[in-house]
Image (spheres, rainbow, N blue to C red):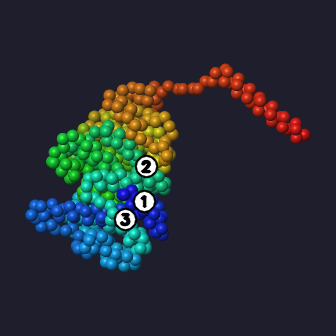
């Protein structure tokens, strides 16, 4: 039922002049999903308050609640089409009253990690692109079919929402920045192995894939107490995101995964001066896939000890600075970082090796990131001790990766198993840090254990091919003679 509802919503959005891409479809679905979720949250909180004998104070005023403006019901509980707004009336209410009202919550909220603050932030960043009030009415009716009441419902909805984010990644243009393949994220989470009570941070969180997968990993740990679950909800996951659409999607994605008030800040992470970072700001776990290929302005570069315009290199400095002593990180970066000869790359590799234990490098094949031909590596490191040995793993699924044949969890099983003991294999090997060139700090992937398989044909196969070519030549000559 949920899957069909999502299809129906996309079908309506395709008719909208204001919505032309998968990014637009996901954005418009997101704000409506959020308001439907908010209605369910209010119903749940009110029921809890009633059981406890307390009065419940609603988040939204009556006029702006989902059941009033979006999906009013008659006495039998069926949609009341006589009362429901539609056409221009609906569009004008949403644009002229609803969005300004919700945006004002940002000023009224008691703190950034409250649901009220998220409401204000979201509705200050996006706008309704659905120009036809009749299309909007149709979409609302499909959204209203969705339920957030049970964990099963939320689980199914989160999978469908993840599929929408994946489609954005497939859509080309800038869509790929929202989607890191989930099998790769799950492998990174398992290697870094966060624990209950540790704080997990992604300063370039995009659609919050790393935080959501880390939450799923921790939530699945055995024998969790009520206190553990409270810790997961309130004191574990932290993110920052610069772009408005990604911010909204990250909030919605985390909510659907079960985190009620995600602690995601809408800010430019790189605008922060690293000299201002104090010990209390540092965290235990960092998981991220920072954007690469961007060019940052000179004033932004002044916030970093190693000056460079490359966005990913600035983020890597940020992550190293934000990691506590003994803290662990898994960071995706372009594979050219390992061997670039420019001063910034060399200085950054030196910093990484001297200040951190770079214990693992996962070399990913082309096609790992859908819609992007860029080759990447994943750096796994811990802060506080210099690197003594680097273990490399060359990921080779044995097929070409692409949209119709993406990376899966089975492709990474061998890496996860061998990484536990840093074992050598045809795909893995170790390099002593003492042997790394102290002038260039080159960390290039060169597999000494790779077995070259050259297919040699037998003499009989070669002779058979020659005979077949001779026969073909004879047939061609015969046809030429017949024409003369």
- Label located before the other in sequence (1 or 3): 1
Element carrying mark 2: loop
Q: Are marks 2 and 3 in contact (CB under 8 Å)?
A: no
Residue at position x 44%, y 42% from top?
407
Mark 1: secondary structure: helix
Q: Position of residue 46 (x, y in %)?
A: 17, 64
User: Residue under circle 2?
Assistant: 292
What residue is shown at x 44% (from left), y 54% (from top)?
A: 167
Q: List x then y, in percent, for residue 106.
A: 26, 67
Is 89 in front, or is 318?
89
- Relative side of 60 to 315, left or right: left
Residue 206 appears anywhere in the view: no
CA gap between label 1 and label 2 equals 33 Å
Q: Quadrant of residue 325?
A: top left
Residue under pointer 3: 142
Residue placed under numbered mark 1 in the picture: 7
Label 2 Cα neighbours within 10 Å, binned few <14 / some 14-19 / many ≥20: some
Q: Quadrant of the C terminus?
A: top right
Query: How far is mark 1 from mark 3, CA to CA?
Result: 10 Å
Residue 36 image point, x, y percent: 30, 64
Q: Residues within 10 Å of mark 1 (few under 14, many from 20)?
A: few
């Amino acid at each position: 039922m949920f899957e069909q509802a999502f299809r129906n919503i996309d079908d309506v959005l395709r008719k909208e002049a204001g919505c032309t891409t998968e990014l637009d479809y996901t954005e418009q679905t997101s704000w409506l999903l959020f308001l439907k979720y908010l209605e369910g949250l209010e119903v749940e909180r009110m029921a809890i308050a009633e059981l406890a004998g307390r009065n419940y104070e609603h988040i939204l005023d009556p006029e702006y609640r989902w059941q009033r403006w979006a999906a009013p019901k008659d006495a039998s509980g069926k949609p009341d089409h006589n009362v429901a707004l539609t056409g221009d009336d609906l569009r004008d209410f949403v644009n002229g009253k609803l969005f300004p009202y919700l945006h004002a919550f940002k000023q009224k909220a008691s703190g950034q990690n409250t649901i009220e603050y998220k409401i204000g932030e979201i509705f200050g960043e996006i706008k309704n692109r659905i120009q036809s009030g009749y299309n909007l009415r149709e979409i609302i009716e499909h959204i209203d079919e969705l339920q957030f009441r049970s964990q099963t419902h939320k689980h199914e909805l989160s999978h469908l929402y993840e599929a929408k984010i994946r489609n954005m990644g497939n859509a080309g243009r800038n869509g790929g920045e929202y989607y890191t393949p989930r099998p790769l994220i799950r492998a990174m989470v398992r290697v870094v192995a966060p624990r209950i009570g540790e704080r997990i941070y992604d300063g370039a969180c995009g659609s919050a894939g790393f935080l959501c997968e880390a939450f799923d990993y921790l939530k699945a740990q055995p024998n969790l107490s009520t206190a553990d679950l409270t810790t997961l909800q309130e004191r574990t996951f932290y993110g920052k995101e610069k772009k408005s659409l990604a911010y909204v999607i990250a909030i919605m994605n985390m909510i659907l995964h079960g985190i009620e008030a995600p602690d995601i800040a809408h800010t430019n992470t790189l605008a922060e001066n690293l000299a201002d970072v104090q010990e209390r700001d540092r965290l235990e776990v960092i998981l991220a896939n920072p954007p690469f290929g961007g060019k940052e302005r000179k004033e932004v570069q002044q916030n970093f000890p190693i000056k460079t315009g490359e966005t990913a290199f600035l983020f890597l400095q940020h992550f190293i600075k934000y990691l506590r002593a003994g803290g662990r990180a898994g960071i995706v970066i372009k594979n050219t970082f390992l061997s670039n000869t420019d001063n910034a790359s060399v200085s950054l590799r030196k910093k990484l090796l001297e200040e951190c234990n770079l214990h693992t490098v996962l070399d990913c094949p082309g096609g790992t990131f859908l819609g992007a031909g860029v080759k990447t590596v994943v750096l796994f490191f811990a802060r506080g001790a210099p690197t003594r040995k680097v273990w490399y793993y060359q990921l080779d699924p044995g097929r070409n990766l692409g949209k119709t044949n993406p990376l899966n969890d089975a492709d990474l099983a061998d890496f996860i198993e061998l990484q536990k003991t840093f074992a050598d294999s045809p795909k893995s090997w170790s390099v002593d840090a003492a042997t790394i060139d102290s002038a260039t700090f080159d960390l290039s992937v060169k597999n000494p254990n790779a077995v070259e398989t050259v297919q040699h044909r037998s003499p009989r196969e070669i002779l058979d091919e020659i005979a077949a070519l001779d026969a073909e030549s004879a047939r061609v000559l015969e046809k030429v003679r017949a024409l003369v």
